[in-house]
């Protein structure tokens, strides 16, 4: 069966040639290949690392290269290798070498069969060619905008066993060939994605062996008794130490070999390249939850029951306390790696959040309940990222019903818009600080501001203009301070008697009833709307100028 899902972690740019992702062999891989040829051998690993790139004959060279495996007949070897690099060298010997060789720190394979040296060279050279061919194939996939599924198809032919990739939530990312005797998968109707069967997941949840595997690095063997066959696996960790998922190779067609550990680690390295370069337009390696969030915020998904079910798979609840951030990207920041690294950095810095590209900006959804801290503390954590990345940020109000996510995203968008308009030198803007600007703009869609505001304001402005007085300003400050005479006098630098004179004059001109609550609210609103209109006019003049 072909892969179930094609999560397109596609590259936007050619694979960087200056980075070295060459696949270098180790002696274990050569030992495995020789045994597959029916050759009887002893293997002494020594300093066996993945550094071999060539094969040569040993004929008494003064210096031995650590990236070369040397072939020799036992009767041609000196009692002690003279090279200064002998401790790091790799050697394959036909026959019995001097006893001291068995206890050296270098890697040693002893061939106990009667074998021609040139025949041995031919076998070893084929091992190099086979692995080099696979490496070049994977590099070509990356250079030609390949994705994880393409890498898995190549790896399937290399390992000769079925393999698949799942993310941290057990969703299947790629599978080149699903065989009948592999573990079964279920279709998650809430997301439309395949995942490991619920029975298997439940078994993992109560398995201490499985939990131990969640902290491992490098290729490991998952034991036979857990799923009925051995599995060679490796955990995928992103650049910030977050578990992203796992590559699994099932031992169903051919025996797993020790040398395949190194090959799987190299494959995982290339997967991490795709993680760092994940596409900001398509769903990537470990991001089905981002698709879910995008569908909710865009109102493509509105079914409360489905939303509640998907949230529960992440440990989040629909009535947790959330807050939404919208970070504006400059054109220079829309390059793939910049967006990816920023999202990863945000998630590593701010726990219990999801950060991803949405509508050409970065959307961050933070679960304050799970985070367990005050919003102000979380904002402080983001300050460095915001300033260093030049990311203007809008923040919604907190909300305790996940169904309000689309509206709170709009709040964050409005905070960002009005914050940039009113205070462009400030990096972080909160919706609560700009909500009145939004209200003023909305009410002026039907009528101009002067036809909405109290008719008493033009009376004062006209009087001030003709008499060079400051009654309108006095009313502004008085209402701003909630009709507190002391604070108003202090701000205007007036004696209290002068203030009360002005207030009596204002009442005489306009007939304001200070005891009428509705009139006070209307006046306060009208003053704010007039100030808003004044600022809009100034901004328009600044832009046109």
Image: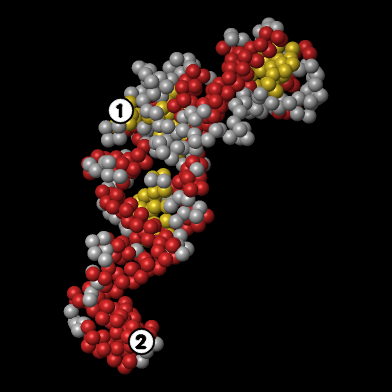
194 vs 540: above or below: above
Q: Position of residue 213 (x, y in %)?
A: 45, 33
420 vs 41: above or below: below
Residue at the image point whose x is 23% and y is 69% from the top = 452
Tell whether 291 sits left or right of 520: right
Residue carrying label 1: 186
Q: Position of residue 387 (x, y in %)?
A: 50, 57
Tell whether 536 sits left or right of 29: left
Q: How would you rate the neighbour count of disc 1 (Cα within 10 Å): few for under 14, some for 14-19, many for 20 or more?
A: some
Tell whether 367 sits left or right of 403: right
Residue at the image point whose x is 24% and y is 39% from the top = 306
SS for callout 1: strand
Residue toward you, 313 or 220: 313
Residue toward you, 366 or 150: 150
Q: How would you rate the neighbour count of disc 2 (Cα within 10 Å): few for under 14, some for 14-19, many for 20 or more?
A: few
Q: Earlier in the sequence, mark 1 or mark 2?
A: 1
Q: Position of residue 321 (x, y in %)?
A: 31, 54
289 vs 232: above or below: below
- When asked about the image quadrant of residue 500, the answer is bottom left
Count of picture labels = 2
- When asked about the image quadrant of residue 523, the answer is bottom left
Residue at the image point whose x is 56% and y is 33% from the top = 15
Residue toward you, 201 or 185: 185
SS for callout 2: loop
Quick check: can you spot residue 73? Answer: yes
Residue carrying label 2: 468
């Amino acid at each position: 069966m072909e892969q179930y899902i094609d999560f397109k972690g596609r590259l936007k740019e050619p694979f960087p040639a200056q980075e070295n992702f060459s696949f270098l062999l180790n002696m274990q891989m050569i030992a495995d290949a020789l045994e597959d040829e029916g050759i009887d051998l002893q293997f002494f690993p020594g300093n066996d690392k993945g550094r071999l790139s060539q094969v040569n004959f040993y004929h008494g060279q003064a210096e031995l290269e650590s990236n070369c495996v040397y072939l020799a007949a036992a009767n041609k070897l000196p009692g002690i290798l003279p090279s200064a690099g002998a401790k790091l060298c790799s050697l394959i010997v036909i026959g019995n070498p001097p006893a001291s060789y068995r206890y050296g720190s270098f890697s040693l394979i002893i061939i106990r069969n009667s074998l021609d040296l040139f025949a041995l060279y031919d076998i070893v050279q084929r091992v190099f060619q086979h692995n080099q061919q696979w490496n070049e194939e994977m590099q070509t996939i990356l250079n030609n905008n390949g994705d994880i599924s393409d890498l898995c198809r190549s790896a399937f032919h290399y390992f000769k066993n079925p393999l698949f990739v799942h993310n941290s939530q057990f969703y299947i990312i790629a599978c080149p060939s699903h065989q009948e005797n592999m573990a079964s998968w279920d279709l998650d109707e809430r997301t439309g994605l395949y995942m490991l069967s619920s029975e298997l997941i439940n078994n993992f949840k109560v398995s201490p062996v499985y939990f131990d595997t969640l902290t491992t690095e490098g290729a490991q063997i998952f034991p036979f008794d857990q799923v009925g066959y051995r599995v060679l696996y490796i955990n995928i960790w992103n650049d910030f130490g977050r578990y992203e998922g796992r590559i699994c190779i099932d031992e169903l067609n051919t025996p797993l070999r020790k040398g395949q550990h190194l090959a799987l680690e190299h494959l995982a390295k290339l997967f991490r390249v795709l993680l760092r370069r994940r596409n900001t337009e398509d769903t990537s390696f470990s991001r089905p939850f981002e698709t879910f969030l995008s569908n909710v915020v865009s109102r493509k998904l509105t079914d409360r029951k489905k939303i509640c079910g998907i949230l529960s798979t992440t440990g989040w609840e629909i009535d947790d306390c959330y807050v939404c951030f919208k970070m504006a990207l400059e054109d220079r920041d829309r390059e793939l790696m910049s967006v990816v690294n920023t999202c990863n950095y945000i998630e590593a810095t701010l726990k219990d959040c999801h950060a991803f590209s949405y509508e050409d900006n970065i959307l961050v959804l933070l679960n304050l309940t799970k985070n367990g801290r005050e919003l102000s503390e979380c904002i402080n954590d983001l300050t460095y990222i915001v300033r260093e990345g030049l990311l203007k940020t809008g923040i919604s109000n907190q909300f305790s019903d996940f169904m309000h996510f689309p509206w709170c995203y709009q709040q964050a968008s409005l905070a960002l818009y009005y914050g940039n308009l009113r205070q462009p030198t400030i990096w972080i803007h909160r919706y609560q600080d700009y909500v009145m600007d939004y209200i003023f703009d909305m009410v002026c869609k039907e009528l101009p501001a002067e036809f909405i505001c109290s008719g008493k304001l033009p009376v004062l402005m006209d009087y001030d203009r003709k008499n060079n007085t400051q009654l309108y300003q006095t009313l502004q400050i008085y209402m701003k301070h909630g009709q507190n005479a002391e604070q108003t006098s202090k701000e205007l630098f007036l004696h209290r008697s002068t203030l009360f004179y002005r207030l009596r004059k204002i009442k005489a001109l306009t007939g304001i009833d200070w005891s009428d609550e509705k009139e006070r609210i209307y006046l306060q609103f009208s003053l704010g709307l007039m100030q808003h209109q004044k600022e809009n006019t100034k901004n328009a003049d600044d832009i046109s100028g």
